[in-house]
Image (cartoon, rainbow, N blue to C red):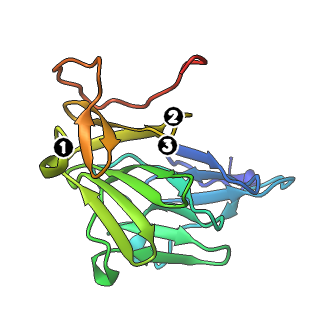
Amino acid sequence: GERDGVPQPAAWLAFYRDSHGTLWARSPRYVLALPPKATSFVDRDVTPASQALFYGSGILTFGEDSHGNIFTQSTTGIARWNGSGWQVFDASNGITFSDVSTILRDRQGSLWFATRGHGLERWLGYGEVANWTVSLGLGNDIVWTMFRDHAGQLWIGDQVQIGQLEGDRIEKAPGFGKSFFQQPSGFTESSDG
């Protein structure tokens, strides 16, 4: 509740425990953080205030880069918490996608963004972005989720197919017929792969 630093009322839709042990919570308006051993949340709302409200068509989410910076959606793109403040990445500084549904960091340190209507984005580093759309094998540019399995294979769930990244293209995953998937919410891997 409010005595624990949690504004009311708010719909808390995303939670994330970062590599330092901080618990992050997100509503369409607020971002909170509960550092390890703390007894109350601290305000980490995206600033400036004009960037704080998320009303896009993606799903509220968090992600973390290899430097421990936290990512979430902003009003116009992606916001990065660097330990002391937010930096917004959007069309004004080179990021041309929004409506993010999932953020994933791979073993090489790249950030991947599943988007609604903009395909799959791979942020190779600050300043370099690679993009996959239907022209490179997605069944639909609305990408709901992605998952990297223990063997390193990237799985993609878009609006109409389950795919795998193969080189520079996305191919339909073997064993998945032509079905209409609606908003696949995630992947998991069994113990035998």
Q: Residue at x 14, y 47 (%)?
A: 134
Q: Which mark is residue 19?
A: none
Identify the image quadrant of residue 84. bottom right
Q: Residue at x 23, y 30 (%)?
A: 161
x and y percentages locating residue 150 in the rendered image = 56, 34
Q: CA distance from mark 2 to mark 1?
A: 20 Å
Q: Residue at x 54, y 58 (%)?
A: 108
Say which of 103 and 14 sits in front.
103
Q: CA distance from mark 3 to mark 2?
A: 25 Å
Looking at the image, which residue sits at the far right?
Answer: 37
x and y percentages locating residue 99 in the rendered image = 30, 55
Q: Which residue is mark 3?
A: 13
Identify the image quadrant of residue 7. bottom right
Q: CA distance from mark 1 to mark 3?
A: 31 Å
Where 146 falls versus 4 (above or below)? above
Q: Earlier in the sequence, mark 2 or mark 1?
A: 1
Labels 1 & 3 near each other (Cβ < 8 A):
no
Q: Which residue is mark 2?
A: 149
Q: The disc labelled 2 sits on which kind of residue?
A: Asp
Helix, strand or loop for disc 2: loop
Q: Which residue is mark 1?
A: 137
x and y percentages locating residue 192 in the rendered image = 57, 16
Circle 1 crowding by C-alpha within 10 Å: few under 14, some 14–19, many from 20: some
